């Protein structure tokens, strides 16, 4: 291939935003010559490389925009360590039908049992399926909504959380909300009700969500909308993060059992 022809091909690819083909066409042309590919085989390989790279870039960008604190996949989840997790139920959730049907998923359990891991893993699958996802801890979201209310921009802030097909709200229950904060959370839940899916994680069973919110009336209203179309996964077990420290004797059995029994007893 002459240098002039190479420059023409690069220019045509750039005009069509085919940047991966620009990089791989020479290598593939050499391979096509060696393997005696047909013209259509060569064209298919070129287009496949372009589409695959566009998919990888799109997933990368959406993953960065989702705000995940780290990346976890279902393949990385140790089901043998947490036998209380129904693997068939997680597999069913991984089809993402719950997002299509605007349903919610709630992971309950003590710290360290994999609630956030599973939430993020489902979020990654949603992104790979072409959906937009956003991850937030409850206290961060409430802070942003409260600031928005003070600035007269609560509608815009609320819309920013409402627009995602899947919103993941992590760590419900670690901090209690006051009346204003609970009202903002209720408003968000109401606006997403039957319009978009949420994945929620909490260290408290539903019977003790009254300790999170200021009164039983708003607690019941929130739970009514969250649970109407939902799947609950209750995880019972020890902290995966602390298992090695437990073996080394750095964390007592009493502390680990106490964390797990608190949620179970609730």
Image (cartoon, grey):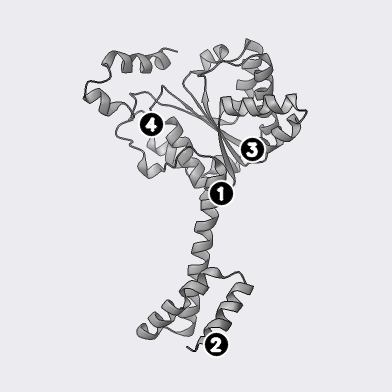
The nearer-to-camera label among 2 and 4 is 2
Name the quarter where the C terminus is drawn: top left
Residue linked to disc 2: 4
Question: In the figure, 117 relative to 38: above or below?
Answer: above
Residue 52 drawn at (x, y percent): 49, 63
Residue linked to disc 3: 196
Name the side, left or right, on which 79 lies relative to 132: left
Q: Earlier in the sequence, mark 4 or mark 3?
A: 4
Q: CA distance from mark 2 to mark 4?
A: 61 Å
Q: CA distance from mark 2 to mark 3?
A: 53 Å
Residue 80 drawn at (x, y percent): 29, 34
Q: Earlier in the sequence, mark 2 or mark 4?
A: 2
Residue linked to disc 1: 62
The nearer-to-camera label among 1 and 2 is 2
Q: Earlier in the sequence, mark 1 or mark 3?
A: 1
Residue at 67 percent across and 33 percent down: it is 192
Residue 197 drawn at (x, y percent): 60, 36
Residue linked to disc 4: 85
Q: CA distance from mark 4 to mark 3?
A: 25 Å
Instruction: Verify CB contact (< 8 Å) between mark 1 and mark 4.
Output: no
Q: CA distance from mark 1 to mark 4?
A: 28 Å
């Amino acid at each position: 291939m002459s240098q002039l022809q190479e420059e023409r091909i690069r220019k045509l690819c750039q005009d069509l935003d085919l940047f991966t083909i620009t990089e791989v066409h020479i290598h593939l042309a050499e391979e096509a010559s060696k393997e005696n590919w047909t013209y259509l085989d060569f064209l298919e390989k070129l287009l496949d490389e372009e589409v695959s790279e566009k998919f990888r870039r799109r997933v990368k960008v959406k993953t960065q925009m989702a705000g995940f604190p780290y990346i976890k996949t279902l393949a990385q989840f140790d089901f043998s360590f947490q036998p209380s997790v129904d693997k068939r139920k997680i597999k069913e959730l991984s089809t993402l039908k719950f997002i299509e049907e605007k349903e919610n998923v709630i992971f309950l359990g003590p710290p360290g049992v994999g609630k956030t891991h599973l939430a993020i893993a489902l979020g990654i699958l949603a992104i790979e399926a072409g959906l937009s996802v956003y991850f937030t801890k409850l206290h961060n979201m409430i802070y942003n909504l409260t600031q928005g209310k003070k600035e007269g921009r609560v509608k815009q802030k609320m819309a920013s959380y409402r627009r995602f097909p899947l919103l993941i709200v992590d760590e419900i229950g670690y901090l209690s909300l006051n009346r204003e904060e609970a009202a903002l959370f209720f408003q968000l839940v109401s606006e997403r009700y039957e319009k978009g899916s949420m994945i929620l994680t909490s260290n408290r069973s539903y019977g003790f969500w009254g300790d999170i919110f200021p009164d039983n009336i708003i607690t019941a209203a929130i739970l009514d909308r969250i649970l109407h179309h939902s799947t609950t996964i209750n995880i019972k077990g020890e902290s995966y993060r602390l298992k090695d420290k437990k073996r080394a004797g750095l964390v007592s059995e009493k502390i680990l059992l106490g964390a797990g029994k608190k949620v179970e007893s609730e």
